Amino acid sequence: MKRRTFIKNLTWGGLSLSLPPLIMGHPLIKEQSPATAPLVAIVQGDSPSELVTTAINALGGMSQFISRGDIVVVKPNIGWDRTPQQAACTNPEVVATVVKLCLEAGAKEVKVLDNPCNPARRTYARSGIASAAKAAGAKVSFPNPHRLKKIPLHGDWLKEWEVYTDFIEADKLINVPVAKHHSLSRVTLGMKNWLGALGGNRNQLHQKLDYAMVDLASFFKPALSILDAYRLLWRNGPQGGRLSDVKLVKTLIASQDYTAVDALGASLFEIPPEELTFLRLAHQKGRGEIYREKMKIVEKKI
């Protein structure tokens, strides 16, 4: 039985409340052992597409994460009505290349989906992500309220929420956030990107945003996290709007360890990861590594 069918049957059958937390996430993807140094790729170069390809190859290729016949959901940040140059959304070339690599690895279908803060039709178009992802072979869908389901999340703070079932039914999830400043959490990277998989009044999550971020990342448990830092929204995030807020750093960070990716992403903002509450929490709970010296890092310049 496919993982998506198994989880759908359990959730829709009302049995989920009695299940351990990993059942409602992605149990077929093993947690990174705290004793194992996570493998992380950091790549710098002029082409966003080549950054992705080089990083994934350094991790062993997309077939390490995606199996033949998988249904994959790629989760970029398409939150704001901004152009790629304004760096409020994930670079469209990065998203398109992830889609392409998944299909080449044998994925049956690749979906690209987010629940933006601005109207979806505007953000999907102006970000350039919709056209780029479609051209690469993805199914690009707007968030559909009929596809929302209140799901037990089994978090330490966030117990349940409305989740788009596309994320629940997928065989694999790939998180493709963009690195940005944020007024509440200081930065928005991979863990915060999961708010875009939710419906409902997400502003309520700002009451304990750090805790919500850690609970959501643990629930969704992506097969792979790919941080787009080609353009860095250095200030006035998360939506920016002025080109003067953007730094061109031409960097991409990728790993199965989403905590490590966010920790290294924080360093791009000159923030020690242990200063960020959500990273300290994730590390304390054994959800990943935050200390660079405990990671196995492959760095490349192309």
Image (tube, rainbow, N blue to C red):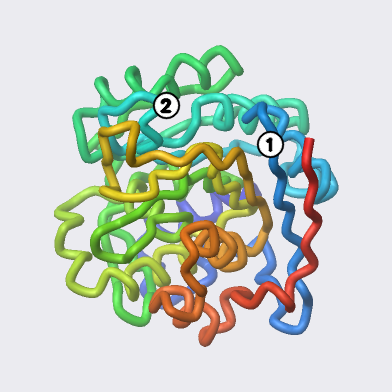
Residue pictured at 49% horizontal, 68% vertical:
218
Residue 63 screen position, x and y as percent: 80, 41
Considering only order in the chain, which callout, 2 or 1, is on the residue closer to the N terminus?
A: 1
Q: Amino acid at mark 1?
A: Val
Locate residue 230 relative to residue 18 in the image: left or right: right
- In the picture as drawn, the residue positioned furthest to the bottom comes out as 284
Q: Which mark is residue 119?
A: none
- Check if mark 1's residue and mark 2's residue have beta carbons within 8 Å: no
The part of the image, by quadrant, that contains residue 67 is top right
Relative to 283, say whether 238 is above or below: above
Residue 183 screen position, x and y as percent: 24, 59
Residue pictured at 72% horizontal, 78% vertical:
33
Residue 223 screen position, x and y as percent: 63, 53
Q: Nearer the viewer, residue 150 or 256?
A: 256
Q: Amino acid at mark 2?
A: Pro
Relative to 22, say whether 246 is above or below: above
**Crowding at label 1, few (<14), some or many (≥20) Cα neighbours within 10 Å?**
many
The answer to whether residue 137 is visible is yes
**Crowding at label 2, few (<14), some or many (≥20) Cα neighbours within 10 Å?**
some
The answer to whether residue 108 is visible is no
Locate residue 183 relative to residue 277 in the image: left or right: left
Q: Which mark is residue 52?
A: 1
The part of the image, by quadrant, that contains residue 87 is top left
Q: Which residue is mark 2?
A: 84
Relative to 153, say whether 166 is above or below: above
Q: Nearer the viewer, residue 107 or 134?
A: 134
Residue pictured at 55% horizontal, 67% vertical:
263
Q: Nearer the viewer, residue 237 or 66?
A: 237
Secondary structure of the residue carrying numbered label 1? helix
Residue 162 screen position, x and y as percent: 26, 54
- In the picture as drawn, the residue positioned furthest to the front comes out as 244
Locate residue 71 relative to residue 16 in the image: left or right: right
